[in-house]
Amino acid sequence: MDKYLIAVDLDGTLLPSLYSLSSYSVKVFNKLREEGHKIVITTGRPYRSSYFVYQAFNLDTPLINYNGGLISNPSDPSFEVKCGLLNRQDLINIYLTQKDNFYLFFAEYFDSIYSNRDYDEIHELMHYSEMAELKVGEIDQILDHDAHGCLILSKEGYGEKIKKYVLENFKDIGARIWSWGPYKEIVELYSQIVSKGTAIKYVREGMGFDKAHLMACGDSHNDFEFFDEAGIKVTLKNGDIEIRKKADIVYPVECKDDGLAKFMVEYFHLDI
């Protein structure tokens, strides 16, 4: 069989929760690597909460974080790191003008987190760990760098107002709203210049694969551009309705039941 570049989203595709990587998935993806396929983690997560998967799969490929805002290669010190950043002053302006509309505002640069508040309940949302440095204070006073990403936990009913303000006033910043656990209106700010799609195209070309041999595996809105760059588009039973419409293959097993690993075993005829 031809060798493929397999680009894998984490949340909702490979991982049902923050650090829930199954031993079965580890076995399957190591088998894929041993058979000559290349695996690239392509996620909205920061480096600190995706590197454990990279290690478990024994990868030597680039790692895509922040939905394309950071491309690095942990196994290759000579790899030229690529960043797509949100302008520091733009974020400060958003923070100051929308301050009455949110509870929490935090921005990230690599594994530094800049937040206006700190309490234990939001550490999981921040993907906070011993790998991270957390700085707390007024964002206009502590943010000392452009950022890879930014999340805003809005007050109830104010998410759309924040999103509208951002989209109308900052051409290089995108905004989308999603929910996570008890938090129903999280406004994510992201660079309009980069995406999972631009990132995986850059990696694919650098690794010498054509589009037909790129398999993209995702589940949600931030995977649209990612799918556009792939010859084979895969989602699982739990994938969002719109992403299922774009997929070539909707595998009828959910992420929580090792759906992606089971798909790989069937598709590549792995002896597991």
Image: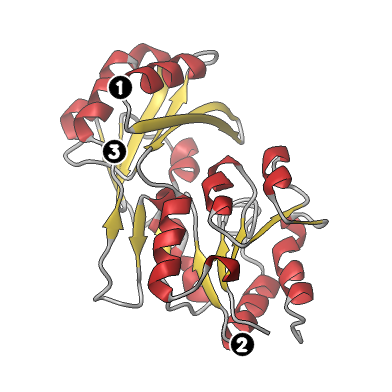
Circle 2: element type: loop
Give the mark toward the camera: 1 or 2: 2
Give the mark toward the camera: 3 or 1: 3
Q: Quadrant of the image for the C terminus?
A: bottom right
Q: Where is residue 29 in the image (x, y as percent from the top left)?
A: 62, 76
Marks 3 and 1, the one that precedes in the sequence: 3
As drawn, is 137 to the left or to the right of 182?
left
Mark 3 sits on what residue? 86
Residue type of the residue flagged with mark 2: Glu
Image: 156 above or below 51: above
Q: Position of residue 121 (x, y in %)?
A: 49, 37
Q: Which of 2 and 148 is in front in this view?
A: 2
What residue do we see at 35% from left, 55% from top? 70
Image: 175 above or below 256: above
What residue do we see at 46% from left, 27% from top? 153
Mark 1 sits on what residue? 94
The residues tagged by marks 3 and 2 sit, at their Cα atoms, a distance apart of: 39 Å
Q: Which mark is residue 142?
A: none
The residues tagged by marks 1 and 2 sit, at their Cα atoms, a distance apart of: 48 Å
Residue type of the residue flagged with mark 3: Leu
